[in-house]
Image: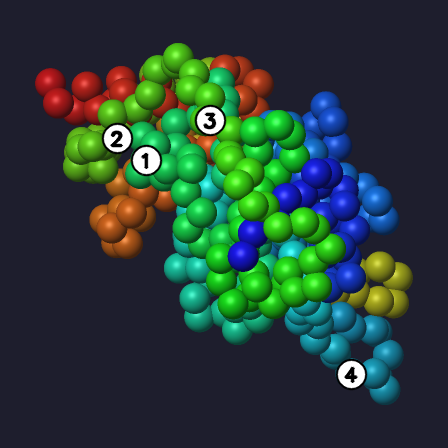
Amino acid sequence: MSWIVKDASELVEFLRTKGGVYGPAGDDRIVFDELGNGAPPNLSRLSDVSARNVFQPMTHYYLRFEDRPDTEVSFRDYDTTPRVVVGLRPCDVAALTVHDTVFAESGSYRALRDATAIVGLVCPAREEACFCDSVGVDPRSTDGMDAALTVAVGGGYVLAALTDKGRTLMSGAPFPESGDATAADFREADHPVLAAEGVPEALGRLREMEIWDEIGFACVNCRVCTYVCPTCHCFTVTDEVFGTEGGRAAVWDSCQSKSFTKEASGHNPRATKPARVRQRILHKYAYYPEVEGALMCGGCGRCIKGCPTGRNIVEELTLLKGGAAT
Ligand code: SF4
Ligand code: SF4
């Protein structure tokens, strides 16, 4: 079943009758957030930050306590009331499989994931930093989406329900059926792509630090690349006390932070920048593929666009692959 949706804000209005609605919000800086009454999602380009916070909140207090002998510690799970996330692109949906794998044993994550329907957006155009198809993701794919929006010739979107969850979500939709509406052509771009084949094998041999010092020379360890990425998932656990109350929270963390691997003894196995730069690239392109048989990258290019010093993972992997081959 498919419909014509003239305006994405009308879709959000309808979906809000089914649960909370999340989507890309903002203009200069697009991030995934809950869309309020009448707020349209910004589908004009790929968001600057991924939808990771929809599935793994940036800060989640899972335990609360009070400094009083007669009170008990209380546990708080994720809010798992039904909700829908609109505007996830194929690279982001593919990236979710990493979270699904890493958090497979987490009942809390599974409950949150199951409570969430995905209304994806088939990519209308390749953007400057995209290299999804280099890592095996088709920008026109609807895999993993419960319903999919495709930009229609003549404006608006064709919206197709693809799964039982998507059909239930769209029941009672007030939109006209799509009839013979057709999807607009995908707009290609001319920019370098990554020849990803053989990269995990080539990188697996690059353990010496000199090459990583060279590759990561420009890095200032700001961590932006990891916080915008849809496949990154590392977190730390921290206790906070506010007066007589407190909580224990799971908070996003980053392998690019010097303190990330610092042990209670004071020893830090990744105390140097080259060691941290190596970890980020090898985890995504060598270690994870070795264990799971898939790259830990959706090719969204957000780390390229977000890096304040201009590091480019496509250029670096190309260089590293060539270096390893010689
Ligand atoms: S965004 Fe750039 S400078 Fe910041 S940690 Fe990542 S690679 Fe380093
Ligand atoms: S490593 Fe970069 S290109 Fe790959 S998924 Fe993360 S942000 Fe996107």
Q: Are marks 1 and 2 in contact (CB under 8 Å)?
A: yes
Whole-number angstrom distance, CA of label 4 to CA of label 1: 49 Å
Q: Are marks 4 and 3 in contact (CB under 8 Å)?
A: no
- Residue marked by disc 2: 196
Q: Nearer the viewer, mark 4 or mark 3?
A: 3
- Residue marked by disc 4: 72
Which SS class for mark 2? Answer: loop
Which SS class for mark 1? Answer: helix
Q: State the image coordinates of residue 259 (x, y, percent, origin top left).
A: 53, 42
Q: Which disc is residue 185 wearing?
A: 3
Q: What coloring was used for the rendering?
A: rainbow
First of labels 2, 4 by sequence position: 4
Which SS class for mark 3? Answer: loop
Q: Nearer the viewer, mark 3 or mark 1?
A: 3
The answer to whether the residue bearing label 1 lies less than 8 angstroms from the nearest atom of ligand 2 is yes
- Residue marked by disc 1: 135
Q: Nearer the viewer, residue 158 or 116?
A: 158
- Residue 291 picture quarter: bottom left
Residue positioned 43% across, 66% down in the render: 104
Whole-number angstrom distance, CA of label 1 to CA of label 2: 6 Å
Q: Nearer the viewer, residue 140 or 215?
A: 140
Whole-number angstrom distance, CA of label 2 to CA of label 4: 53 Å
